[in-house]
Structure formats: C-alpha cells, structure tokens
Image (spheres, rainbow, N blue to C red):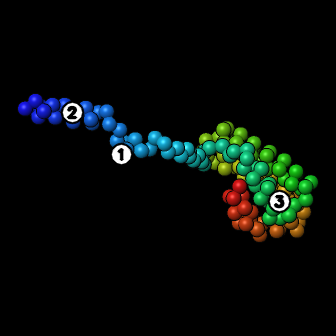
Amino acid sequence: MRVSALQPLLALALLTTASCSVFHRHRDVATPPVVVETVRTPESPTPPTAARDLADAMTTVLRLRPDQTTKVRQVLNSTVEQVNAARKEHPAQSPQLNTALARINAASDRQLRTILGPTTYREMQVKRAQIQAEMQKR
C-alpha cells in the first residue's frame, strides 16, 4: 500500500524535474532575426537614398559619364529635399502640394534635360521603365 500511495508523488516529481525535448528543443537553435519592412505612405518623406539609387540606375541604363552622374545626383538630391519640404509645408493631397510638386518636377526635368543633352534625355524617357526596374534592384 505504501508504494501505491507514493506513485502519484513519484510521477509528479518526474514530470517537474525531467527535461522534455518537446518543450526545450528550440533552445539550441538560433532564432532568425526579425525583419521589419518600412511601409511608405504618400505622406511619408522621400528617403535621401532614393536620389542616389535613381542616379545609379540612370548611370547604369543610360551609360552616363562620371561628370553627368555627379550633376544628376546633385539635381536629384535637391529635388528630394524640395519635395520633402513641400510635403511638410502643405497638407497631403492638397492642390497647393500638387502645384508645388509639379513646379519642382518641372524644374528638375529642365535641369536633367540640360545635363543629359537631347539624345540621352530622349533615351531616358524611352527607358524610364527599365530605369525604375534597375532602381528596384538596389
């Protein structure tokens, strides 16, 4: 009788002290790092790296000279700064913001046309989708 009275206690002791691989098997395995993706909204600022990536993509697709690449980067960096300033100044989706963005894009376009020349500028317009695809790789 004494043995049967101790059986529940013995079972409880075994359960609490025994190491079960079901509960502890993941301890030795390194957990993968958490990946956080940034979701951009129309109101969020354009990251400064966008100008660099676009200039690099244009250089690759259009085979720009180093002096052209430098000037294109300057224009695109300035454009990003102006766009971000306009987004801070005007409410999202407002006519004032749309007008400011159209003005900024037109000025940037004129500068790019001057830097690239007529032939390369036309090539840029034709290869716009290819430039965007190249930029997405970066």
Residue for point 84% across, 53% down = 72
Residue at 87% x, 61% y: name it: 64
Label 1 element class = helix
Q: Quadrant of the C terminus?
A: bottom right
Q: Secondary structure at mark 2?
A: helix
x then y, percent, for residue 69: 86, 54
Q: Residue at the location (68% across, 58% down)? A: 136
Mark 2 neighbour density, 10 Å: few (under 14) some (14–19) many (20 or more): few
Taking 20 as reference, is 124 left or right? right
Q: Which mark is residue 10?
A: 2
Dot 1 or dot 3: first in sequence order is: 1
Question: Is 37 on the left or on the right of 85, as rendered?
Answer: left
The answer to whether the residues at label 1 and label 3 have Cβ atoms under 8 Å apart is no
Neighbours of disc 3 within 10 Å: few (<14), some (14-19), many (20+): some
Pointer 3 and pointer 2: residues touching (CB < 8 Å)?
no
- Check disc 3 and report the residue beneath it: 59
The location of residue 114, given as percent across then percent down, is 89, 58
Q: Nearer the viewer, residue 27 or 123?
A: 27
Left or right position of 122 against 136: right
Label 1 sits on what residue type? Val
Dot 1, crowdedness within 10 Å: few (<14), some or many (≥20)? few
Asked if labels 2 and 1 touch by Cβ distance under 8 angstroms, the answer is no
Q: Which amino acid lies under the numbered mark 2 shown in the image of this protein?
A: Leu
Location of residue 37 in the rendering, given as x and y in whole percent from the top left corner: 57, 47
Q: Nearer the viewer, residue 71 or 102?
A: 71
Dot 3 or dot 2: first in sequence order is 2
Mark 3 and mark 2: Cα distance apart in space: 75 Å
Cα separation, mark 1 vs mark 3, equals 55 Å
Q: Position of residue 66 (x, y in %)?
A: 90, 55
- Disc 1: which residue: 22
